Image: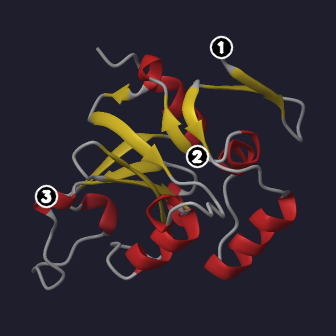
C-alpha cells in the first residue's frame, strides 16, 4: 500500500511503504528545524516529513542503483538519537563537504544520503561514500559535487524515492 497525500500545491505524492515510521510532526516543528539548520527544506522532502517522517522502508522498495536504503531519519524521534534527523544532521555537519548539504539517511554500507539545500544543486539527492572519503586536506581542492566520494542519486527527493526497487 502506497502512502498518498495531497500536498500544498494540489499534487499527489505516493511514498513507498514503510516498515517503521517516525512520530507525526507539524509544520511548526519543521519550521523550527529549518530555522535551527539555517536552510529551508525542499517542498518534496518537507511533505515527506509531514506524511511519513522517515523510518525504515519496506523491503518492497529499498534498493537503488548505488545501494540499499537502511534508514531515513525522523524529525524529533524520541526513541533513539541515532534515528533523529536533528541529532544526526548536526553531528555530521562538520564532516560534510558543504554546509549546504543535509544528512537525511544512510544506506546499508554506511554511505550518507544527502539533500542539497541551496546552490546550483538545490533539491538534489546525493550519496557520500564514507568508506573512501576524500581527506579534508587533499590537494587539489575540488568542488564538493566533483569529489570521488560523492555521487548524485536523483534530481529531487521525490524522484529518489520513486526510483527505489524491491530488495531481493
Name above or below for residue 135 compared with residue 162.
below
What residue is drawn where x is 59% and y is 54%? 74
Q: Disc 3 and disc 2: Cα gap in Å?
A: 24 Å
Name above or below for residue 48 compared with residue 17.
below
122 left or right, relative to 68: right
- First in residue order: circle 3 vs circle 2: 2
Name above or below for residue 141 compared with residue 129.
below
| Neighbourhood count class around disc 2 (C-alpha, 10 Å): few under 14, some 14–19, many 20 upward | many
What residue is drawn where x is 13% and y is 58%? 131
Q: Residue 3's x, y, as percent?
A: 71, 24
Which residue corresponds to mark 1? 1
Q: Nearer the viewer, mark 3 or mark 2?
A: 2
| Neighbourhood count class around disc 3 (C-alpha, 10 Å): few under 14, some 14–19, many 20 upward | few
Image quadrant assignment for residue 15: top right
Location of the N terminus by quadrant is top right
Which residue corresponds to mark 2? 54
Amino acid at each position: 500500500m502506497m502512502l498518498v497525500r495531497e500536498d500544498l500545491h494540489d499534487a499527489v505524492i505516493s511514498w513507498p511503504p514503510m516498515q517503521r515510521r517516525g512520530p507525526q510532526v507539524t509544520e511548526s516543528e519543521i519550521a523550527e528545524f529549518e530555522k535551527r539548520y539555517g536552510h529551508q527544506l525542499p517542498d518534496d522532502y518537507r511533505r515527506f516529513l509531514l506524511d511519513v517522517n522517515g523510518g525504515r522502508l519496506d523491503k518492497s522498495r529499498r534498493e537503488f542503483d548505488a545501494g540499499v536504503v537502511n534508514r531515513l531519519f525522523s524529525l524529533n524521534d524520541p526513541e533513539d538519537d541515532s534515528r533523529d534527523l536533528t541529532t544526526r544532521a548536526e553531528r555530521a555537519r562538520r564532516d560534510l563537504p558543504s554546509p549546504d548539504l543535509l544528512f537525511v539517511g544512510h544506506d546499508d554500507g554506511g554511505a550518507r544520503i544527502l539533500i542539497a539545500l541551496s546552490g546550483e544543486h538545490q533539491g538534489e539527492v546525493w550519496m557520500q561514500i564514507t568508506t573512501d572519503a576524500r581527506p579534508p586536506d587533499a590537494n587539489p581542492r575540488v568542488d564538493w559535487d566533483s569529489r570521488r566520494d560523492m555521487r548524485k542519486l536523483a534530481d529531487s527527493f521525490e524522484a529518489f524515492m520513486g526510483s527505489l526497487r524491491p530488495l531481493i
